[in-house]
Amino acid sequence: MQERPDTTAAYDSTWTEQAPAQPPTGMEQVMLSSGKIYVVLAVVLIIWVGLLTILFRTDRKIDRLERRLGDDRSDR
């Protein structure tokens, strides 16, 4: 019976090494250097808050309309 070679030793050096740190390139460098990344994040956050606000307001309005419709049908 032939012994199986230890393959974990071959991968140990790969797993223990850290990935090489790459310097920011292109758009990353522009955004990070002048602080524009925070502006982009703020705009995205404002958009999400706006969308969630519209969603909740619409849900409440629909809920009120459904209740009113249910009340109208029970009166008949």
Image (cartoon, rainbow, N blue to C red):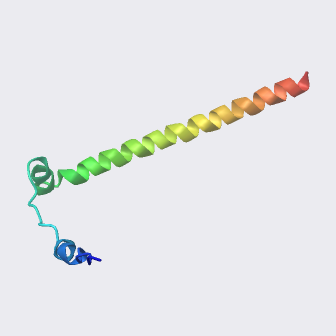
Residue 7 or 21: which is nearer the viewer? 7
For the point 49% across and 43% down, the residue is 52
Q: Viewed as shown, does residue 69 lie left or right of 11?
A: right
Res 17 quadrant in image = bottom left
| Total count of labels | 0
Q: Residue 38's spot in the image, x, y percent?
A: 24, 54
With respect to residue 28, does 16 lie above or below?
A: below
Please identify the residue farthest to the front as the structure is shown.
1
Location of residue 64 in the rendering, given as x and y in whole percent from the top left corner: 70, 34
Residue at 38% in and 42% down: 47
Residue 66's place in the image compared with 42, above or below, is above
- From the viewer's perspective, tell me whether residue 76 is left or right of residue 22: right
Q: Quadrant of residue 24?
A: bottom left
Q: Position of residue 48 (x, y in %)?
A: 41, 44
Q: Farthest top residue?
A: 76
Q: Quadrant of the N terminus?
A: bottom left
Query: Residue sitting at 53 percent across and 38 percent down?
Result: 55
For residue 25, side relative to residue 3 (left or right): left
Question: Percent x, y for residue 54?
Answer: 51, 37
In the image, residue 63 above or below residue 18: above
Residue at position x 15%, y 51% in the image: 31
Quick one: quadrant of the C terminus? top right
